[in-house]
Image (cartoon, rainbow, N blue to C red):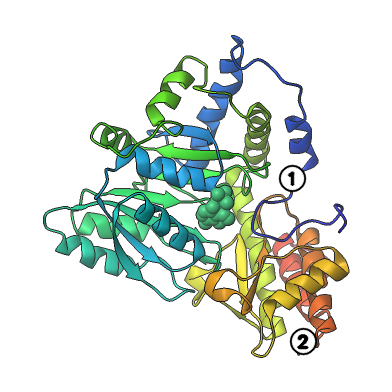
Amino acid sequence: MSDQNPVFIPGPTNIPDRLRAAMHVQTRDHRAPDFVETFAPVLEDTKKVFGTTSGRVITFPASGTGGWEAALCNTLSPGDKVLVARYGMFSHRWIDMCERHGLDVQLIECPWGTGAPADKFEAALSADKSHSIKAVLVTHNETATGVKSDVAAVRGAMDAAAHPALLFVDCVSSLASMPFEMDSWGVDIAVSGSQKGFMLATGMAILGVSDKALAAMEAATLPRTFFDFKDMMGANASGGFPYTPPLQLIYGMRESLKMLLEEGLDNVYARHTRLAEGVRRAVGAWGLELVAQTPDLYSDTVSAIYVPSGFDSNALTDQAFNQYGVSFGVGLGEMNGKAFRIGHLGSLTDVMVLSGLATIEMAMADLDYPIELGSGVAAAQEHFRSKTGAAIKSA
Ligand code: PLP
């Protein structure tokens, strides 16, 4: 396995040299008076990525899973009802966490390959006349299936039902790669992590939190210590941390935000759309199918792709890794053996994506897939040339 090759897993993502250098710093004293100068701008700039001016950013030394737990334990009490739809491995895991915390999960089962069903949420919320549902949980980008859900439509459903529940959104594999509008979507807690769109090492849970969510803390009795919002906000306000912060990640985050804002968030999102569409064109050229059932559900950060019947997707990802030293995402849960995933988020260019497509084509050819070598690469090339204007210049 060569570390020269990019990874095509949907996170952790490739870490650009600039960010590796930013994280490669000697220990500094987090209790020194200058820590606040480092950390406060990080919190402020992260708000731009969440699309919030009214919310706060709270971080913890954790991965995205820790962020899920922080969202639940700060705002809810044992026995509280939460409304959630299951449409993939990550929505499933958050549901499992709710159950383990003694929450009462009202579950909407959806086929994998579909997204959050706003109409079913509206029906459930409208039927909940006593407002026993305290929170609605949505996985914005289901990394297991490559499905993007319409969070604005869920907010619309909540408003149509005039329901006061909190709205929690997992944006672990979408934030900083796909548009996210915490304020206009009325999101109360958005949960993300450092290792995907922010292109950093794993280890920081990053949350956007609304005033309404903070108010819910007063009545919430689920136990919390490490993940207590109040402790973290109180310490941050005076330039500190309630325990030892992940300093190197904070320096990395500062640089990551500079990179994202230098490129411009709209350009970052447009690049992800272009790369994703290149991958989708390749999938079409191979004659394969995406797990995401309709184009409005296509994720711009990860594509889950069914292998033809009679083939094992794990053999394909193994072949790509063992023969060519390149990692692709395996099929998770129900998709195991049936689908593989191409992660196309973070620090990636058209050229890097073409190398990934060329690699998986070779692995498919090695395993006698009914595909033509070069067909997917050519389809993506055409797309990238059309989008950069190169096709027009050379015509
Ligand atoms: N939610 C989504 C959508 C994810 O893709 C992941 C991880 O891939 C998680 C949650 C869990 O995050 P972590 O692995 O950082 O704990």
The x and y percentages for residue 138 are 39, 57
Q: Which residue is mark 2?
A: 371
- Residue at 55% across / 64% down in the picture? 299
Q: Secondary structure at mark 2?
A: loop
Q: Is residue 370 above or below residue 103?
A: below
* Quarter of the C terminus within the rendering: bottom right
Is 350 situated left or right of 172 in this image? right
- Identify residue type, mark 1: Ile
Residue 245 figure quarter: top right
Q: Nearer the viewer, residue 99 or 336?
A: 99
- Residue at 40% across / 66% down in the picture? 86
The yes-or-no answer for disc 2 within 8 Å of ligand 1 is no
Q: In the displayed orientation, state which residue is furthest to the left.
A: 130
Is 364 situated left or right of 220 in this image? right
Q: Is residue 345 above or below residue 24?
A: below
Q: Nearer the viewer, residue 51 or 291?
A: 291
Q: Secondary structure at mark 1?
A: loop
The x and y percentages for residue 141 are 50, 59
Residue 183 visible in this rendered orientation of the protein = no
Residue 336 figure quarter: bottom right
Residue 95 figure quarter: bottom left
Q: Which residue is mark 1?
A: 15
The x and y percentages for residue 21 are 79, 33
- Name the disc covering residue 257, or none: none
- Identify residue type, mark 2: Ile
Q: Give the spatial CA distance, label 1 vs label 2.
A: 32 Å
- Residue at 36% across / 65% down in the picture? 85
Is 49 situated left or right of 104 in this image? right
* Quarter of the N terminus within the rendering: bottom right
Q: Earlier in the sequence, mark 1 or mark 2?
A: 1
Residue 307 visible in this rendered orientation of the protein = yes
Circle 2 Cα neighbour tier, 10 Å, few/some/many (<14 / 14–19 / ≥20): some
